[in-house]
Structure formats: structure tokens, C-alpha cells
Image (tube, rainbow, N blue to C red):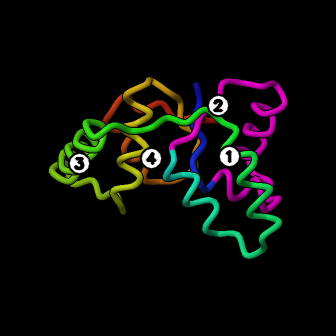
Amino acid sequence: MMIVDSNTWADFFNGIRSPHVQHLEVALQEEEDLAIVPIIITEVLQGFRTDSGFQRARLVLVSLPIIQPTVNCHVRAARLFRSLRRKGVTVRGAVDCIIAQACLDIEAELLSPDADFERIALHTPLRLWRL
């Protein structure tokens, strides 16, 4: 299973060409096992300026299987944040830790070029898609 982060979805919907977007396009065409965490839906949809873009993206995103982080996942995400901070690793926000922890919990690969996830992956078993 692969979870696609908000920055890759945003680039996809904005027509930006990148290796991550190309991988997402292939995954969609080949009907690979994709899923989404609800906070990613929020992050992607809040960026749309037009109602038509919002509605088009909403239809795609809500059609994916939803990975709903539990309360325990949120607790583990806080532990992850604290553990990284003790190691001198700065993650900009709790949302990235929640997404990373949700991926860790279900052993999903994460499709994201975000440097925070690179830092998390250096200190955890988080699997990131790489070229």
C-alpha cells in the first residue's frame, strides 16, 4: 500500500511535472493500492482557489481507501516527534509525524518529496518512495 502526501497531490492537480507526480500517475493508471489519511485531504483541498478544482480533487481523494489514525497512533506520533527532537532532528509540524506514524503502523510506503519525511525515514523504518 502507498500513501501519497499532500505536496505530491497538489503538484498532480496543478499539472506540475515531477518524478513523484509521474509515479503517482503510473500508480493511478495501474490501479495500484493507494490510500489516504484524512488530514492530507484537508491539506490538499484547502489550496484550491476555484470550486471546480476543489470538487474535482475532492472526488478523486475521497474515492481512495481512508487510513484513519487512531488515538494511539496520535500518541505514537507525539512520541516520534519527541524522540526525533531528542536526536536533534527538527520536524516542522505534528501533521507530518501523524502521517509518518500512520504509514509506519500499516507498513505503507509514503510518496512525498518533503524533507521532513526524509529526516524521519533516517531514524525510523518509514519507507519512502525513491527514484
Looking at this view, is 57 or 94 the one in front? 57
The answer, for residue 121, to whether it is visible in the render is no
- Residue numbers of the magenta segment: 8-37
Tell me the distance, in whole angstroms, between the alpha carbons under discs 4 and 3. Answer: 15 Å
Tell me the distance, in whole angstroms, between the alpha carbons under discs 2 and 4. Answer: 18 Å
Tell me the distance, in whole angstroms, between the alpha carbons under discs 1 and 3. Answer: 26 Å
Contact between marks 1 and 4 (CB within 8 A): the answer is no
Q: Which amino acid does the dot numbered 1 rest on?
A: Leu
Q: Residues within 10 Å of mark 4 (few under 14, many from 20)?
A: many
Q: Which residue is mark 1?
A: 61
Instruction: Give the mark toward the camera: 2 or 4.
Output: 2
Q: Residues within 10 Å of mark 1 (few under 14, many from 20)?
A: many
Q: Residues within 10 Å of mark 2 (few under 14, many from 20)?
A: some
Which circle's residue, 1 or 3, is located before the other in the chain?
1
Looking at this view, is 1 or 51 the one in front? 51
Tell me the distance, in whole angstroms, between the alpha carbons under discs 1 and 4. Answer: 21 Å
Screen quadrant of the C terminus? top right
Name the quadrant containing residue 69: top left
Tell me the distance, in whole angstroms, between the alpha carbons under discs 3 and 2. Answer: 25 Å
Q: Which residue is mark 4?
A: 117
Q: Which amino acid does the dot numbered 4 rest on?
A: Phe
Left or right: where does residue 94 sit relative to residue 22?
Answer: left
Which circle's residue, 2 or 4, is located before the other in the chain?
2
Name the quadrant containing residue 50: bottom right
Q: Which residue is mark 3?
A: 78
For numbered disc 1, what is the local secondary structure?
A: helix
